[in-house]
Amino acid sequence: MPFATTWRTCGSSRRSPRPTRAWALGLAMLERTLNAASRWALDRVGHERVDYVVSNTMTEFNRKVMPFLWTYELKAVVEQVLDEATDVKTFVLRPNQHWQGMLAGQHIEVHAELNGQVHHRCYSPSARPDGRISITVKRQPGGVVSEWLHTQVRAGQVLNLGKPRGRFTLGDQPKVLMLAAGSGITPIHSMITHLLSRPLAQRPDVKVMAQFRHADDIVFQPDLRDWGALGLPVTVALSQPQGVTETDGLKVVTRLDATQIIRRCPDVAQRHVYLCGPDGFMQQMLATLAELGVPQRNIHTERFEIATAVQPPGTDIDLEGAEVVFEHINMAITLSKADQGKTLLQLANEHGLHLEQGCGKGACGTCKLTVHEGEVCGNVLGSSVYLCTSFPASRTLVLGA
């Protein structure tokens, strides 16, 4: 809103000129000062104390003067924008006092209001030792939010965020294989960064395999190279190598397949596998892992793409009286005729079961469960079912975490 004053001469009033360059510089300096004060408070005073002070001094004046801190919402200021690879940028963010940490591998939503419509997209953050976080975003053809982030967002801007969600997180497995393609490397990067912060004796036996299209598409290339130097086995593959066998000291191989995997990870069947990437890659890897003897229960998946439209099962499947069991909460629901054509998440909500849920589009994985018995149709990846975009398709269906 432009600043202006009214002044009176000989009985008439006129508006002052629009803000001068001095005004603009003054406002910019004030904004920098307030941002510096916010950073100092979060770093030196701490999130909990800042939250206590802010919650007890929440006035309209404070909310207008310092909206980054005096708010009930999770926000983050963009401190750096880094080029990672072709059409890939990393945004280094400093969240406000409402950030309570995350589990490595979880995702957060970025909320962007564009042309009067609010868009939500999920990205996997990586925690930094200084309390900041970073998200790495690939520019998607026709992607509304990724295009906005790449072309409009600059250092100093404030983003609205959702709180961390998702179950694509490490357990206490002793042996792990990380499989990723393209931007699917981002949650893997978060988990590996976390693991490397542990003492060596507390780390599991981990191997990483990541596939990209071309050498210019390799994301986190310096980190991948450094992980290898730290003794973490890393395999980087190119689906279209164009004769490249090494790039900036990082050796690369051809497309990942059963032969490549068994050669570099002969005990794959004894490992838990964390798999993330485009749907085509993941479907191929699921088939390959099954061929190599990896139990489905040991495969953990994450996807970022919004699921394609799915349709409920036809009327030839009579679901009246069918039972859906949610083992992880020890609850079951019996379906009625009115439940026909509803997604599993809708069924759970309407029968009073309060399950975790996120984007509602089959992308974020917050509502994802595992099929233990029975059949579903819709958005299924291996044994994982995304409740918001899937439907029961058998008389008995047993789901669990």
Image (tube, rainbow, N blue to C red):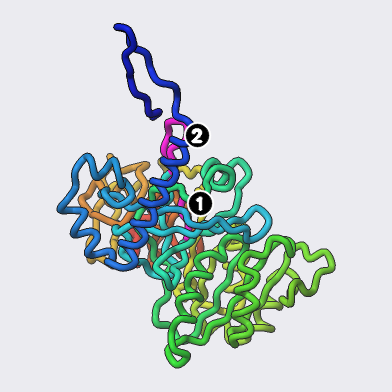
Circle count: 2
Q: From the viewer's perspective, is residue 369 above or below residue 248?
A: above
Instruction: Name the amino acid type tagged 1.
Output: Ala
Q: Position of residue 388 (x, y in %)?
A: 39, 49
Instruction: Name the disc covering residue 155, or none.
Output: 1
Left or right, 225 with respect to 385, comes to: right
Q: Quadrant of the C terminus?
A: bottom left
Q: Earlier in the sequence, mark 1 or mark 2?
A: 2
Magenta residues, start to end: 112-124
The dominant secondary structure in magenta is: strand
For image coordinates 44% across by 68% down, the residue present is 127
Q: Nearer the viewer, mark 1 or mark 2?
A: 2
Tell whether position 189 is magenta. Answer: no
Marks 1 & 2, CB-CB < 8 Å contact: no
Task: Give the residue displayed 78% in from the left and 66% down from the top.
Answer: 241
> Residue at 38% across / 48% down in the picture?
160
* Residue 122 belongs to magenta span: yes
Residue 387 image offset from top left, x and y in percent: 38, 53
**Any part of residue 103 in sight:** yes
What residue would you read off at disc 2?
21
Residue kind at label 2, given as amino acid type: Arg
Which residue occupies 62% across, 58% down?
83
> Hey, which quadrant is residue 104 in on the image?
bottom left
How many other residues sit within 10 Å of disc 1, few (<14), some (14-19) or many (≥20)?
Answer: few
Q: CA distance from mark 1 to mark 2?
A: 21 Å
Name the foreground residue: 223 vs 172: 223
Q: Residue furthest front?
A: 10
Q: Check disc 1 and report its element: helix, strand or loop.
A: loop
Q: Residues within 10 Å of mark 2 (few under 14, many from 20)?
A: few
